Image: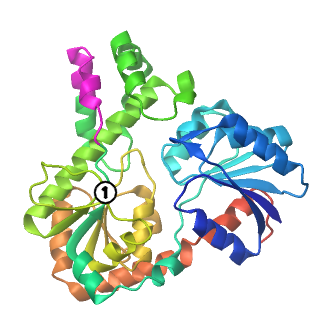
């Protein structure tokens, strides 16, 4: 087997390559440079055309879905295998998601189901993320690093500050209050996308006022080349869910910080967090594993744009041998047996579980070991890549 591996800037590139090498799969790399996150379409298509002149590629593989890769593979009649680690994947709103040469795997089952309902005849599948436990096991935590990164509780992540209140200011009072109420309900509800299901066609028509449309379109920070193909109401949904995520993270961090030492690693400093020690950003490869290993409790507070998925942060924490305290996600409940992590269902529950596990060290360490063993056995890149290839008919069991 021979793959053409398309690589955009991604933290998973080295892990994918290591897994392919372990599986004995031959591949050539096509590194795609981006300018401010934008992909030069014609440049990529030209590079793919040149690569395809050398016969023998069974498929093209990339982390995340890219419409330009789908176009190139469709034109050449070569299978395109894409595995997402972002949610939502904005380029999936292109109609070429439904090419019969595409095999696209989503780590969020809810997003996969949503996109399946939107189109027919496509190869869309759910596939959870993976983690390279060998890389984390090779990280040694020295005494000095344990003192530097050690904490009762830590959280590595961002706050998703956005412009939602500016956007809502463009709405009449009823629509503004309705969306505010939706965010309040979503904040208290895990595992269900309350906001999207409540943005009915009738209500969306009420939102179609020029001032709001212009504000959303001008403020939208993602790929500009998607243009009108990425619906304005979907952009609004993202901003609403990001605001819920921001508020939840502030609420949980502030609550736990009142009672326990809590370190917050992020490039976003939030002045309202009075009881949290802001540590600045931490490097994904060099610093983050040390945080996970040195902290007694590692928090995960999932972005609400991930409706059902297990975030990469959870797998990284467990691969490092850290203890995970996370909000409820339906896939987490299904795939992580009791005793491999701690799951909370509201901020107050997070506080009670943090209090319990900080005072029960042996139980906390036992759960951390069980979580590490779980991801080591069942969340490997090798298994995920074999599943992708088997599903596309390129690998025999």
Q: Secondary structure at mark 1?
A: loop
Residue drawn at the location 34% of the way across and 39% of the way down = 241
Q: How is the image coloured?
A: rainbow
Q: In this picture, which residue range is highlighted in magenta?
A: 161-179
Magenta span dominant secondary structure:
helix
Image quadrant where one finds the C terminus: bottom right
| Horizontal and vertical percent position of residue 26 | 79, 68
Residue 220 x %, y %: 41, 30
Is residue 101 visible in this depiction of the protein? no
Q: Is residue 390 left or right of residue 126?
A: right
Q: Residue at x 78, y 60 (%)?
A: 3
Q: How far across and down, in percent of the image, does residue 317 sit?
A: 38, 71
| Identity of the residue drawn at 16% across and 64% down | 351
- Residue on which disc 1 sits: 301
Q: Nearer the viewer, residue 179 or 171?
A: 171
Say whether residue 165 is magenta: yes
Residue at 51% across / 44% down in the picture? Answer: 111
Left-right relation of 290 to 37: left
Establish if 194 lies above or below 298.
above
Q: Examine the structure image and report whether residue 380 is included in the region drawn in magenta.
A: no
Q: Height in image: 254 above or below 228?
A: below
171 is higher (above) or lower (below) than 358: above
């Amino acid at each position: 087997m021979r793959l053409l591996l398309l690589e955009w800037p991604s933290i998973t590139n080295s892990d994918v390559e290591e897994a392919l090498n372990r599986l004995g799969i031959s591949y050539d790399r096509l590194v795609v440079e981006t300018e401010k996150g934008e992909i030069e379409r014609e440049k990529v298509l030209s590079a793919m055309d040149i690569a395809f002149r050398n016969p023998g590629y069974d498929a093209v593989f990339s982390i995340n879905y890219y419409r330009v890769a789908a176009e190139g593979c469709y034109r050449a009649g070569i299978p395109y295998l894409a595995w997402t680690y972002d949610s939502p994947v904005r380029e999936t709103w292109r109609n070429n998601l439904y090419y019969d040469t595409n095999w696209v795997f989503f780590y969020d089952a809810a997003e996969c189901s949503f996109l399946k309902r939107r189109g027919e005849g496509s190869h869309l599948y759910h596939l959870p993320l993976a983690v390279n436990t060998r890389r984390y096991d090779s990280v040694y935590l020295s005494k000095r690093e344990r003192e530097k990164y050690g904490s009762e509780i830590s959280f590595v992540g961002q706050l998703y500050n956005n412009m939602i209140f500016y956007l809502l200011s463009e709405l009449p009072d009823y629509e503004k209050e309705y969306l505010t109420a939706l965010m309040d309900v979503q904040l208290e509800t895990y595992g269900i996308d309350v906001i999207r299901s409540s943005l009915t066609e009738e209500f969306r028509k009420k939102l179609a006022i020029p001032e709001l449309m212009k504000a959303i379109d001008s403020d939208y920070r993602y790929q500009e080349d998607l243009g009108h193909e990425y619906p304005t109401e979907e952009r609004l949904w993202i901003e609403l869910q990001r605001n819920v995520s921001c508020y939840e993270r502030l609420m949980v961090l502030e609550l736990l910080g009142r009672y326990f030492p809590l370190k917050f690693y992020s490039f976003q400093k939030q002045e309202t967090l009075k009881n949290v020690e802001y540590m600045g950003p931490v490097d994904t490869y060099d610093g983050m594993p040390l945080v996970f290993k040195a902290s007694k409790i590692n928090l995960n507070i999932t972005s609400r744009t991930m409706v059902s998925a297990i975030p990469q942060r959870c797998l990284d924490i467990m691969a490092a041998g850290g203890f995970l305290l996370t909000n409820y996600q339906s896939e987490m409940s299904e795939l992580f047996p009791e005793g491999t992590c701690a799951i909370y269902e509201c901020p107050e529950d997070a506080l009670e579980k943090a209090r319990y596990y900080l005072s029960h060290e042996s139980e906390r360490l036992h759960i951390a070991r069980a979580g590490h063993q779980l991801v080591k056995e069942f969340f490997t890149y090798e298994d995920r890549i074999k599943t992708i290839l088997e599903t596309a008919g390129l690998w025999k069991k």
